[in-house]
Amino acid sequence: MHNAIEVRNLCKQFRVRHRSHLKVRLMSMFKPTQPIQTFLALQDVSFTVPHGQTVAIIGRNGSGKSTLLSLLARVYRKTSGEILLYNPQGGPARTAPLLDLSAGFHLDLTGMDNILFFGAILGYSQKEMQDRFDSIVEFAELGDKVDTTLRNWNEGARLRLGFSIAVHTNPDILLVDEVLAVGDEAFQAKCYALIRRMQAQGKTILFVTHDLRAVERVAQRVIWLKQGHLHMDGPVQEVLSAYRVFSAEQGLESMK
Amino acid sequence: MELWRYRHLVKMLVARELKVRYKNSVLGFVWSIVPPLLQVLVFTFLARNAFGVPAKNYSAYLLCGLIPWTFFNTAILDASQSLVINYTMIRKVYLPREAIPLANVLSNFVHFMLGWVVYFAAFLVIARAFGGGIPLLPSMVFFPFLVLLEALLVTGCALFVSALNVFYEDVKYVLQTLFSLAVFVLPVLYPADLIYYSNTVQHHPWLFKLYLITPIAALIDAFRHCLLQSISPGTINMHLAGKPSLPFQPAEFAVSCVITIFTAWGGYAYFNARKWQFTERP
């Protein structure tokens, strides 16, 4: 039996590139001046997530949280290691990446067109999206607005649409990057209710957040990344209390 | 193939291109027909009145060059910007990246085919009803082959240029400069015969061979030979009166086909080699 997510010895290296003048570039073609600088965003990260578990990823800015999620969403290519994603039947998993809710939208198209378009990005046909159309609109509380172009919508409405589409496409694995913090109170409550429902349906959820209260509310396990390393991986309270101590120390140090 | 799984996405991208282009205009699709039509009217008027070109059906000869040329340059220019315009999208969700420039090529291909529909309607149907127009020729059976060949050429160039533009945004300016000159150098406004009879080429015949194996020049020339009867050069430029018109050159065209295929393959290979670096550019 496979787990939902299996990550082994994952490394991600970025090249540090400086915007340079054409002259510098041309000269470096003839005599290599300095070796290419690289930067390891993730080093030897391994973990597995069983089906149906909700895992929170925490850590300071620049610790590699978003890089990890982007690797799982196939936006970046891994430098080395292994990433395997399975659905409960053992086939390849369908993932819904919520890295930026409005990324797939086009402001000059109507809500309706954007629903079809965003669905197509996630690999669904027009027919499949039209079947889900009503429940998507209802959950996002859009009403007649779907027939107008997104340019005239407020940020919150676009966000609701994105979240609504992603969860209604019935993914096996949901990847969420710090996006729920943006909506208003009422919508956030609705999102958490929906996340509970998805948990009950046995979906696997991986989310990145700085909101430790949200972690306590929905996560069953926490992974703490520190400077690209997997620093701690365990039950919610255990990791969170260690992280709080660490954060407090960091805060004190910066005050000195 | 992965693109097949994402065919809905490609379809949506093309539809989006077509819709967004005329998003806030009242006349919509009319705007993809009116500008080339006006172009042809003005050029034909100038040719007849200012340059004294007596050639019959000059506008048909002009359109035969203008339609393939417009597809070539607008599709490649659009594609060159496509990855940069959709940059936020490719940074946040996975999709086969070649889908984005391909959608640009396809949406321009729709306009290209629309152009031909107007062309055939105007010269084969409407003009003939009034006693003018162009005759049906047996060589027209090669038309679909030429259309496919141009699509292949444009796809290869579009993939290459779109990938390159992610790293060097100078590409756009280079292309704009090249294209604005190319319209005069390529046999768009005049048949290739005029180049052949020019003084320089008469002294260095290899130059003309080079000219005819350039894929886009070869294609425009082939479209003309395929759709129209050869025109005698004297009716375009009176200094050439009495010179015979140039027959179709199969050998040079075959070489240009090979170059086209290599361009398509090379463009795709370059795109593939680079596509994972798109999201990591500085």
Image (cartoon, helix red, strand yellow):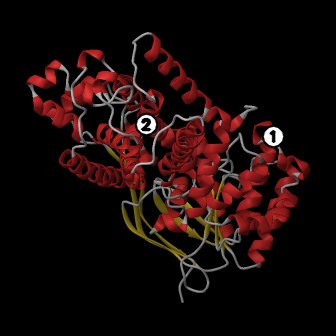
x and y percentages locating residue A178 in the rendered image: 67, 52
Quadrant in the picture for residue B69: top left
Q: Nearer the viewer, residue A48 or A84?
A: A84
The circle drawn on residue B23 is: none
Q: Relative to B235, is A58 above or below?
A: below
Disc 1 designates what residue?
Answer: A153
**Label 2 packing within 10 angstroms: few (<14), some (14-19), many (20+):** many
Q: Amino acid at mark 1?
A: Trp
Q: Amino acid at mark 2?
A: Cys
Quadrant in the picture for residue A245: bottom right
Query: Farthest residue toward the left?
Result: B203
Q: Which chain letter matches label 2?
A: B
Q: Decide if residue B81 is in sight here.
A: yes
Q: Is residue A114 left or right of residue B157?
A: right
Q: How many marks?
A: 2
Quadrant in the picture for residue A174: bottom right
Badge 2 element: helix
Q: Which chain letter matches label 1?
A: A
Q: Decide if residue B276 is in sight here.
A: no
Q: Are marks 2 and 1 in contact (CB under 8 Å)?
A: no
Q: Relative to B24, is A251 above or below?
A: below
Disc 2 designates what residue?
Answer: B64
**Residue at the spot 61% in from the left edge and 65% down from the top edge:** A123
Q: Nearer the viewer, residue B78 or B70?
A: B70
x and y percentages locating residue A167 in the rendered image: 73, 65
Q: Nearer the viewer, residue A211 or A170?
A: A170
x and y percentages locating residue B121 in the rendered image: 58, 43
Work out how far the residue at label 2 is from the one at label 1, CA to CA, in angstroms: 45 Å
Badge 1 element: loop
Query: Farthest residue toward the top?
Result: B50
Query: Farthest residue toward the bottom?
Result: A1
**Label 1 packing within 10 angstroms: few (<14), some (14-19), many (20+):** some
